Image (tube, rainbow, N blue to C red):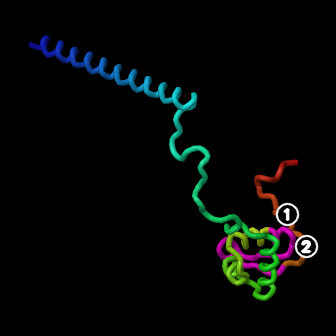
Amino acid sequence: MPNATASQIKDRIAEFVQELDRLVRKNTLQALQDVLAHGGTPARRGRPAGSKRGPGRPKGSGRGGNIDDAAAKVLAHVRANDGQGISAIAAGAGVALPVAKKAAINLLAEGGLKKSGQKRGTVYHVGSGRPARAAKAGKRGRRKA
């Protein structure tokens, strides 16, 4: 009896492998026919070639903005309201926060602004007009003589 069931299992496995082989061959043939029907290029998935994206955001409406204009607004606001954080400066100057951050970085490098405090406690003041000094090298930056 065990030999009969073992041979039945082997027969079923052989039938399954043959059926699987036929399906793979059929699928491969279909894929080749599709490639030949589309001029030698495989069929694309997704959006048809040449079609454009949806409308999205119009050009110029992003957060980009002009950094130079924003820097002038930020500097004017800091002169009038010394010691505020960047979010208050951005709101008061009417500039988007990311643009105000970039403008503040530029003004710090040029010497138009100086800052005090750390991280969330950073506040900005009117600068001396001289470019900021280079940061001191840490312990890792020093070389032995």
Q: Residue at x 57, y 58 (%)?
A: 54
How far apart marks 2 and 1 lie (CA) works out to 12 Å
Q: Which residues are magenta?
A: 106-126
Report helix, strand or loop for mark 2.
loop
Residue 136's x, y, as percent? 82, 62
Q: Residue at x 70, y 78 (%)?
A: 90
Residue type, mark 1 in image: Ala
Q: Which mark is residue 130?
A: 2
Would residue 134 be found to the left or right of residue 42 on screen?
right
Residue type, mark 2 in image: Arg
Q: Looking at this view, is 135 or 1 the one in front?
A: 1
Would you say the residues marked 2 and 1 are in contact, meaning their CB atoms lie under 8 Å apart? no
Residue 27's x, y, as percent? 40, 26
Q: Residue at x 71, y 82 (%)?
A: 84
Name the residue that disc number 1 marks: 134
Quarter of the image with the N terminus in it: top left
